[in-house]
Each structure stands twice: as structure tokens, then as C-alpha cells.
Image (cartoon, helix red, strand yellow):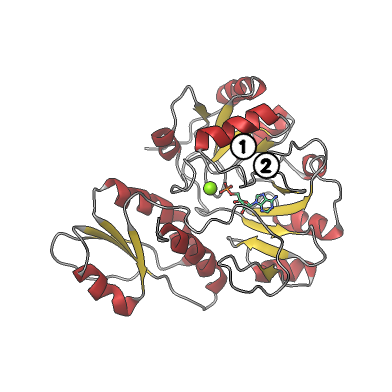
Amino acid sequence: MSRSSAGPEEIATAIHRLREGRLVAFPTETVYGLGANAFDADAVARVFELKGRPANNPLIVHVSGLAMARACVTAWPDRADVLAREFWPGPLSIVLPKSDRVPSNVTAGGPNVAVRCPDHPLTLALLEAFGSPLVGPSANLSGAVSPTTAEHVRESFTEEEVYILDGGPCIGGIESTVISLAGPTPVELRPGLITPEQIEAIIGVRPARLVRDGRSSPATPLPSPGLLARHYAPRTPAVLVDAPGLAQAIARAPGPAVILTHEPIAVGGPHRVERLPTDARAYASEIYSALRRADASGAAQIIIRRPPQGGPDGEIWAAILDRLSRAAAPA
Ligand code: AMP
Ligand code: MG
């Protein structure tokens, strides 16, 4: 139902709202963002309030390009420059020491800010016309499944709360890779569609992975806020199971279940199968919509077949698994 309909008139309305310190949802290549003027602490506070977002979870700042990014930070190292030139516009957020122009609520009180240039013509036009950066966490209530269509955003917020720029469905489907260049060694804070391998090919070092489940990490990790165990989660209880455990999980389901799987399976009884693509990028693009449909179906449980591991797309599958593990984490 989502259609690419917004144009110059809608952009003008959006800018009017942003100048009033109000919120505008914008499309990106990853998920829809909940935008507010990043240099306006009151507008930023509204984002936290409306999402019910914990104050210790920092926001990514969206920019139209290198010049706007540099206004947000105090240093722009060569590594940031080459990564931005290679991957922007695109799903890579770069964390660097914040400049004084960025209010402290954007960074959850921390010294560093995440910046990225999103790859969507409508949002690039919005950022250019607004002339200033926009914070953009995902446009959903905190902890819930991220929105990949304008309709998803409409399910969470009223028109009065959030003006929505409809740019059609998001093609990437999972949030940006977040890499910190604030310390001596690059650290991947959140996996995404830009892989450590791709980053290494540009800067010559493989970012250390911040292991976010409390176990040890390859490098001294930055104490990064916003790494919640349960996130991206449907309201319906979800479980993540290996292929061998699938039959047993289905047999034990507390009622009609929706089974999300990339491999065909035959299921009888009241259960329903939602087939996802076997290609990692196509899977990423559809996973949040599938979770939302499963949630809306009234099922008693969502059973997610663990996606493949390793192989040429191993790092993409790992980014997907990161989201699925959090979606299925106990409440
Ligand atoms: P979202 O609300 O889905 O856009 O999530 C934004 C995520 O980006 C946060 O939860 C953090 O994982 C990461 N992030 C944003 N800003 C920072 C920062 N200054 N330092 C570390 N991580 C950040
Ligand atoms: Mg989010």
C-alpha cells in the first residue's frame, strides 16, 4: 500500500514542522527514521519522549554529506574521510567526538556522536533543503520492530505527532552498521549491511567487534550505551530455534504459531508458515515486515528458524542474527 508519493510540497511541509521543533518521519535505505532538528535539544527531547526511548540510548545524526558531518564533530580523521567517501550515502554510521553544536541529549550524555548520510533521494533532498542535520532513530516505539514502510510508521504515531514523508518501502531493511573511530582502534558497535570485510578493504584494518552480551571483546570496547538485550521485538513472544529443534518448538507452541523460515517446511494444524528469502540481503529487506505481519496475525507465538551461518554472506547473516536474537530475547 505504501507508495512513493512525497515530493517538493511534502518536503516543504516537513521543513516547516522541523523549524517548529516538531517531528518528521523520513525514509532511508535501511528503515524509517524519526527526524528532529539535531541542533535543537528540545526537539531531540521530544523524540525520546514520543518513542519512550531510554535517555541512555544515543541517536544517530543524519547529514546530507561530508560538510554537514564535519559540523557535528571535532575531528574528521582520514579513516572517516575514506569510509564516508566510499560508503556514503549508505548504511554506515561513524562515531566521532561530538562538536559543541550537538546537544548532549543526542549522544545520551556521552562525548561521541554517530553520523551518517542516508541513501534515499527524498531524505537527501530534505536534509539539503533543511540545511542542518537531523537525528533519526527508527520511527517506532522504543524496543519494538523497526518500520520499513510509511504505513508501519502510521501504526505507531498520529499525524499530529509525526509528519510522515512517504518514500516507499526501505530496501535495506535493517539498521546501519555503526563503527566507532573515536578511539585508537576502529570498533564495530552494531553490525549491518556494510560488513567488517568491506570496511577493512578501505581502511586496512578490520574493526574489532564489540561483543554486546557481556562476554569478552576482542578489543577494549567503548562503554557504548544503547545496546539493549531486548530490541526489535514483536509483542507476540518469539523464539529463535535451530533447524533440528524446529519440529519440537512447533509441537510445543502454546497456540497457533507463525513460523518464519528461509527454507520450505511443511506444517500442519493451526500453524502458518511465512517464507523468507534465502538470499541474505533480500531476507534483511523483508524481516521486519514479516515480524510485523506475524505480530498482527494474532498468533500465540512466533517461531523463527535460525538463519544460515557462514558462507559468502556470513557477515550479513550475522547482522540479521543480531536483530533476531534481540527480537527473541526474553522480556
Ligand atoms: P536506532 O535508534 O535504531 O537508530 O539506534 C541507534 C543506535 O546507534 C544506538 O542504539 C547505538 O547502538 C548506536 N549509536 C548511536 N549513537 C552512538 C554513539 N554516540 N556511540 C555509540 N553508539 C551509538
Ligand atoms: Mg531502533
Residue 307, image x, y percentages: 42, 70
Name which of mark 2 and mark 1 comes first in the sequence: 2
Residue 113, image x, y percentages: 73, 47
293 sits to left or right of 144: left
Residue in front for this viewpoint, 64 or 187: 187
Note whether 98 is above or below 279 in the view shown. Answer: above
What residue is at 57 percent from the left and 36 percent from the top?
A: 48
SS category of the residue bearing label 2: strand
Which numbered dot is residue 123? 1
Residue in front for this viewpoint, 93 or 82: 93
Question: Where does the N terminus fall, quadrant-wise?
Answer: top left
Separation of residues labelled 2 and 1 (CA atoms): 9 Å
Residue 267 is at least partly visible in this image: yes
Residue 158: quarter of image: top left
Residue of label 2: 62
Question: Where does the C terminus fall, quadrant-wise?
Answer: bottom left
